[in-house]
Image: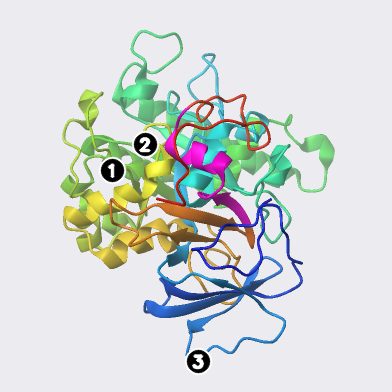
Amino acid sequence: MKKLIHYTFAACLLAGVAFAQDRPTAFINARVIPISGPVLEQGVVIFQNGKITAVGDARTVRLSSDVVTIDMAGKTIMPGLIDTHSHIGGPAGADGSAPIQPDVRILDSVNPEAVSIQRAQAGGITTVNVMPGSGHLDSGQTLYLKLRDNAVKIDDLLIYDKDGKYMGGIKFANGTNPIRTGSGPFPGTRAKSAALVRDQFIKAREYRDKVKAAGSDKTKLPPRDLAMEALVEVLDGKRVVHFHTHRQDDIMTALRLQKEFGFRIILQHVSDAWKVADEIAKSKAPASIIMIDAPGGKLETMDVSYTNGAALERAGVLTGFHTDDGITDSRWFLRSGGMAMRAGMSREKVLYGFTMAGAIMLEMQDRVGSLEPGKDADFVVLSGDPLSVYTHVLQTWVEGKKVFDRADARDYLIAVGGKGATDENDTHSDIHCFDGDIGGGN
């Protein structure tokens, strides 16, 4: 956890100096992009005890005598980025024994000390949906994480809902990956893939009916089935489906299944979204897209288009972004928005996609996604415009604590590569060398 006292960016950072969390802290003189309102050219963001307490213009926001001020002149501040589909932390989900394994919990396989989490911090990501892979029709339960610093156990990163339950969805997939032609119990065809999913949801309905019929009589309960319990949560709307899908016919199959069984769905990837954007809009399904600067790899993605974001925006679809890390390195997440805007997506919706759209998809819109009083103090300090290729993430803050600082030699190593930056055995605490000049945040 790296904290600091009042300074100007031109001065050297005072490593290891801490200020009391119970004192209010103000970022002043920054260009602030709150998402929830107009850009503030001389903005002020005040936070205390992990929460934002005020956001406004320097001419109207009054600073109390006890506030710790940090001069951000020449810098841009925006909400922490939300990655709605990632694989940081080295998660491993279902195995080769069956194509549908909803009982698998990615909670049991994420390494909170993985350097990939630090790389995401270096990219300005503060909240992330960590998923199992797409080699199964259902590869297990996902996990929503806050990228807090110095985590030694997964509990340190968990996000809890109002009922005290850690938050996450469930991963479904169709298309090439889970078909696995000629591979044991896997479907082999697209039609069989959908048939297997239908079969499991029908079994889950029957399981739910038996539990309801038993009432308070435990002797009438069916044998406990963790897989069925997870699918019942899906049917009851308590767990959202994150559905990996690419081709237009696979997108339509996912929507068909959603309509048939009434579950909540977020479409992931949707390479052919530009072909069926209106159909996606009619379903009211949100879409999380990935922008790849070097497309290729699978035939089902051959028609992927940079115009996906623009097409979904025109259709009125809630659209967010994701890295699928390591398909896209988390450190370059913001670059995705620049590509989407160049292909016709509006600047407003691109920035919204990185922040509030993701917050809505993860059901955290009352806590993250914009700079507003009462929300978590998650924000990114940038050297320039967020959609410029020349801009660097200078700092990342999570719940009022700095988790990445490009001016720190160890964090600079994570940001730019070099020895140790991609070694999963290295963390903040044990990286002692770096390549090149740390330079002061260039």
Contact (Cβ within 8 Å) of mark 1 with mark 2: yes
Q: Within the image, what quadrant is residue 355 found in? A: bottom left
- The magenta region covers 402-418
Front tag of 3 and 1: 3
Under circle 1, the secondary element is: loop
Give the residue number, with chain letter if any, for mark 1: 291
Residue located at (23% from left, 33% from top): 294
Task: Reply above or below: 69 against 87.
Answer: below
Give the residue number, with chain letter if any, for mark 3: 60
Q: Amino acid at mark 3?
A: Thr
Q: Is residue 184 left or right of residue 270?
A: right
Task: Reply above or below: 282 against 188.
Answer: below
Q: Is residue 421 left or right of residue 219?
A: left
Which percent across, then down, holds residue 143? 58, 42
Q: Nearer the viewer, residue 424 or 162?
A: 424
Give the residue number, with chain letter if any, for mark 2: 328
- The numbered mark, 1 or 2, whose residue comes first in the sequence reads 1
Q: CA distance from mark 3 to mark 2?
A: 41 Å
Which percent across, then down, holds residue 75? 42, 66
Is disc 2 surrounded by few (<14), some (14 to 19) or many (20+) residues within 10 Å?
some
Residue located at (46% from left, 79% from top): 43
Q: Amino acid at mark 1?
A: Met
- The numbered mark, 3 or 1, whose residue comes first in the sequence reads 3
Residue located at (41% from left, 40% from top): 243
Q: Amino acid at mark 2?
A: Thr
Which percent across, then down, holds residue 235? 53, 46
Q: Nearer the viewer, residue 67 or 254?
A: 67
Contact (Cβ within 8 Å) of mark 3 with mark 1: no
Under circle 2, the secondary element is: loop
Which percent across, then down, holds residue 91? 56, 29
Q: Within the image, what quadrant is residue 221 found in? A: top right
